[in-house]
Amino acid sequence: MPELTAPQWLAVAGALAGLGLLLSLGFALQRRRVEARAYLRGVRYVLSDDPDAAIEALSDAARLGSPEAVETYLALGSLFRRTGDMARAVRLHRNMLLRAGLTPERRREIELELAEDYRRGGMAGDAEAAYRALWQAGERRAGEGLRDVLVDAGRLDEAVEVQQALSQGGADPVRAHLLAAVSRARSAAGDREGALAAARQAVECPGHADALLALAEAEAAAGNRAAAREAADAALSADPRAALLAWPALQALGDPAEALAVVEPRLAAAPADPALHLLRARALYRAGRSAEAADAARQALALDHTGEVTVSMREVLRETTSPAPEELPWRHELMVKALLRKVRPARCSRCGAETAVPAWRCRRCGAFGSFGPRA
Ligand SMILES: [Zn+2]
């Protein structure tokens, strides 16, 4: 073999390096092609509505490590959850976690998704354990999930504790909602002092209608009628939309004349507010002025453009069990009108769930105050 000069050596080395590069590029390209095929197959199954085949195909792609597959997986998982297919969502996310080489961020993201599947699938124990582990590892979103699991389970005091840890100081509307719920739960258990204490903590968040209504209910139960009336009034000032949720507070005032004293001045200032008309109807009915109540309810229906008040009216008409015989004609008339009315539901800004019934908390995702004004 002839001696090679230095430049010749360099040329050979360069050529070998080039060849190596070409080969590895070829392998990489080949690998990408296989991944892309598995990925496209997965997407095709998703589109043709064959989720099990899609999970399988996407598993192949994910094993091969394509970033698109991970994204598609996550999207598919949230699709399953949205359509209520929790078993598939769980299987999908568990499969994803089996994949080697996930970055810690990706792993946490998938674990959060899995915890959410557990929560929504009614596997509260698994959800709590998963969220707790992530929360202890410093994942803030897991704290929110843990709080929601605790609220679902009615463990409100613990939920308040978690929320307190999540709170970054200052007014915290979620904490106020939770404390309002704590207050009502204590009330229901006969603990008036405890109910009052929780409600007073709740109103530390200024202008919070739910907290103020809870305070009104607790003050009324403790016999502090003036304070109760003041709090109910403040709630309606803080958020006019609270009117549909204000009846328990107004009813707790005891004397329907007190409820009318809160509602009627507001109605004079806002005569087109159907929710106030419905509140007035309920107070009048309680006061035994049922013909006037029927008129007020008719007005509420006539003014209700979103259907929100109509839904509440259906509830009211359903609730009252044994009407006097002379009430039957107008009750029937109102019921028919209320049932025929089309209702536009409110949509949760966090998860997109729709509700016709007014509520502070989204039952699906657990968010508080997430229902905006109706379309
Ligand atoms: Zn929601």
Image (cartoon, grey):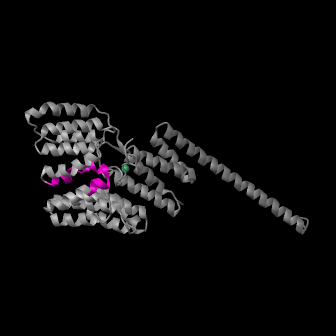
Q: Position of residue 137 (x, y in %)?
A: 42, 68
372 in magenta = no
Residue furthest toward the left? 325
* Most frequent secondary structure within the magenta stretch: helix
Q: 277 or 313: which is nearer to us?
A: 277
Residue 322 at least partly seen: yes
Q: 337 or 70: which is nearer to us?
A: 337
Q: As displayed, is residue 6 above or below residue 348?
A: below
Residue at position x 35%, y 38% from top? 344
Left or right side of 257 for 298: right
Q: As displayed, is residue 297 above or below residue 105?
A: above
Residue at position x 49%, y 43% from top? 54
Q: Which residues are magenta?
A: 234-253
Q: 351 or 278: which is nearer to us?
A: 278
Q: Position of residue 366 (x, y in %)?
A: 34, 54
Q: As displayed, is residue 309 above or below residue 367?
A: above
Left or right side of 128 for 296: left
